[in-house]
Each structure stands twice: as structure tokens, then as C-alpha cells.
Amino acid sequence: MGRKLARTLQLGILFSVVLFGYTVFSDQEFAKWQTNFRYYAQQHGIKDATLDTAFRGLLIDKKVLKLDTYQPEFSRPVWEYMDSAVSPERVEQGRYVLKQYAPLLKRISDIYHVDIEYIVAIWGMESSYGQQLGNYSAIRSLATLAYQGREERRNFWRTQLVAALRILQSGDMPSNNLRGSWAGALGHTQFIPSTFEEFAVDFDGDGKRDLRASIPDALASTANYLAQSGWQQGQPWGTEVVLPVTFDWMETEPANWQSLNYWSAQGMYRVDGTALEDSPTLRAAVIIPAGYRGPAFLTYPNFNVLLKYNNAISYALAAGYLAERLKGGLEVQAAWPRNEEPLSRLEKAELQERLSAVGYSTDGVDGTIGPNTRAALRRWQADTGFPADGYATLEHLKLLREQTALPRMLEAGS
């Protein structure tokens, strides 16, 4: 019984030390970290008074640490993301917002040359038009992450914490307004502190840039961000297209920019049946976010600007479609492959490992289907007889399991 009790106590201690994927440190260690951070912050222009105000009674936010280490087993399919992001309710509310803030939006658009529907779409995507601003203390969240978050990201969080302290020190946003997402994003359109410093503007003329308390500041700052990122007013983000039956799936890559004339010459046209513009200079890329069985989209330079706001294909696609729906445009016309089961993160890692094992290197195994993995998958698909769309499915993984099982069986029998 004594050994069992000792083992139970050991397990209890271990569970308290390694909890939810992060290491739990003592209050003394956090105090030591704060002392070291104060010196670092002072070297970057933060005054003692600001640090005293920000760090008074500061405690670690364990909920933030759980969210930082949480990685969902299954990624959300793009069609589920679109269903939520461009829901009928969000479209209806967005059209109301367009009318409610029409004079303000016109003034912002006239100054920054960004289409009002895209400003409103990002507002809807980021905070449901101000209904979900988030209530985490940015200082507490960023201090927690800089001290005890994932090690490879701590320098990033430390930089964001210093930026948040500069915002506080400047008087732009008081501490009670420095609240937002668990990761420190602020205001109606969720700027991280370093983005705030670079792009936030005082549009209401009160001498402060407050993205939580001032809707004019938040929307104008968003327009400024898009404008500085290369937004082309009056140009669409892209369009849904129909691909010819002879289309080379290797061409479906976000980085494969070609002229509209190039795509037209291959027999591509808009989903409504109309031809693409006759343009030898306007460049576009074809994406198929659900593989060859799903819709295809021709994306223009403004799509890349949306990606700068949030570097996820599903986000940029949803923001573009929400803006188009606010204008009265159509929903996605082609059917999504809704019966397709998404791969889990572990299954994606297994797919990477097995691709590499059969001679199609993915340059690492991380459970994320990035450009290197898509390129390797395309080569394997082409050699195996699948459409080379770079979209990973359970069918692919099952075949790769069969392909990699044979050598192992032979090795075991030798």
C-alpha cells in the first residue's frame, strides 16, 4: 500500500507540473521573469510608471495557456467555416450596418480608397460587428504567453507585450479598454498591438486611437491597413469559375499567378457562364480549397491583401464572399464535398511521414498541409493516377498505408 500511495503522489505531482501541455512555474519564478522583463521593456522605452500600473497584482491566466496549447484533433472543413462566417444572419446584419454607418463609411472610403463592403465584412468576421469584442486583458494575456506560452513563440509575445505597453503609455487606450481576444488582439477589428502601432488612426479627432471605444477609429484603421497592404479599390477579390475537363490540376496553387488571358485560353469561365475579362496584364491564381471535387475560384491581387489581414485561405475566401453578399452577390454555386471526412492533425502527420517514406519528401512532419506537403502530394497523386490537386484525403492516406506496408512486411520476412 505504501508503494501505491507513493506512486499516486508522484503522479499527482507530475500532473500538477505538466498540466494541459505547459509547465507550471511558481510565483517566485514569475516574479523573477517580471524583473527581467521590466529591464527589457525599459530598454525599449517603457517607463516605470507604466510598468507599475500594468503589472500591479498581475497573475498568470491559465485559461490563456490552455487555449495556446489547444490544437483541435480535426481541422474545420472550409465549407463549415464558410457556413458560419457568411451565414444569412451575418449577411443581413451587415447590410443593416452598411446603412446605419453609411456616412462614416463613405468618408473612410473616400480617404483610404477601400470598398466599404470589405471594411464591413472584416468587422463582421472579427467581432460580429462589435458584438464579440473579447474581454481578456491584453496585458495579462500577453504577459502570460511571453512568460509561459509555447517556447518557440515567447519572443513574439514579448514583442507584442511591449507594444501593448506603449499603447497604454501613449494614452491611446486606457487599461480597461486594452481587452480583447485571448491572444491580445484588440478592438472591433482585432488588431494585435504591433499592427495597432503601425496602422491604427485617430479618425474621430479626439487625439486618441481607441479601437474598442471608437467605431470610427476601428473602421478607419482597418481601411488604412488594407490600403497600406495594396488594396485596389473597385477590383474584386476573385470569382468562382468553371474549369475545363482537360485542366491541369498542378496549376491550382495560390502562388501560381498568371494573366487572365492565360486562364481564358485554357477554357476557363465564370460560374455564371460569362467569359473572363480580356486582360493580358491582370494576374490571377486558381485555388480549390476543397480539392477537385469542390468549387474552384480565380483569385485577384485583393485576395492577397485579405490574406495579409489573416493568412488563411478559408478566412480570405469568407471575407471576400461576405463582402460580395453584402453587395447582393450570389453564394458559392458549386457543391462542397460535404461527405468527405477531414483528416485529423495526427493523420496529416502520418500522411507526411508515409509520403516521405515512398520517395515524396514533405521536408518535415508537422501535421500541417503547407506548400511543401502539397507539392509532394501532387507528385504522388500524378504518379498514382489521382487528380494532382494537392488536397489530402482519407482515400490517399489509406493507399499510402498499403504502399508503405509492403516493404515493411518484406523486411520482416527477410
Image (spheres, rainbow, N blue to C red):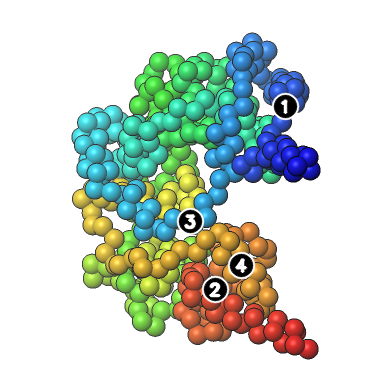
Residue at 65 percent of width and 85 percent of height: 406
Which of the two labelled residues, at mark 4 and mark 3, occupies the earlier sequence position? 3
Q: Looking at the rendering, which quadrant does residue 25 occupy?
A: top right
Image mark for residue 207: none
Which of the two labelled residues, at mark 1 and mark 4, occupies the earlier sequence position? 1
Q: Is residue 79 visible?
A: yes
Query: Which class describes the residues within 10 Å of circle 2: few (<14), some (14-19), or many (20+)?
Result: some
Q: Amino acid at mark 1?
A: Ser
Residues at marks 4 and 2 touching, judged by CB atoms closer than 8 Å = yes
How many angstroms separate mark 1 from mark 4 (CA)? 37 Å
Instruction: Give 295 or 148, whichever is nearer the viewer.
Output: 148
How many angstroms separate mark 1 from mark 3 (CA)? 34 Å
Q: Which residue is mark 4?
A: 350
Residues at marks 1 and 2 touching, judged by CB atoms closer than 8 Å = no
Depth-wise, is mark 1 or mark 4 nearer the camera?
1
Q: Which residue is mark 3?
A: 75
Q: Amino acid at mark 4?
A: Glu
Quadrant of the rendering where the N terminus is positioned: top right
> Is 111 situated above or below 205?
below
Image mark for residue 397: 2
How many angstroms separate mark 4 from mark 3 (CA)? 15 Å
Q: Position of residue 4 (x, y in %)?
A: 74, 43
> Is 77 situated above or below 70?
below
Horizontal arrangement in the rendering, residue 166 relative to residue 329 (left or right)? right
Q: Which residue is mark 1?
A: 26
Q: Looking at the rendering, which quadrant does residue 101 occupy?
A: top left
* SS for dot 4: helix
Q: Position of residue 322 (x, y in %)?
A: 31, 48
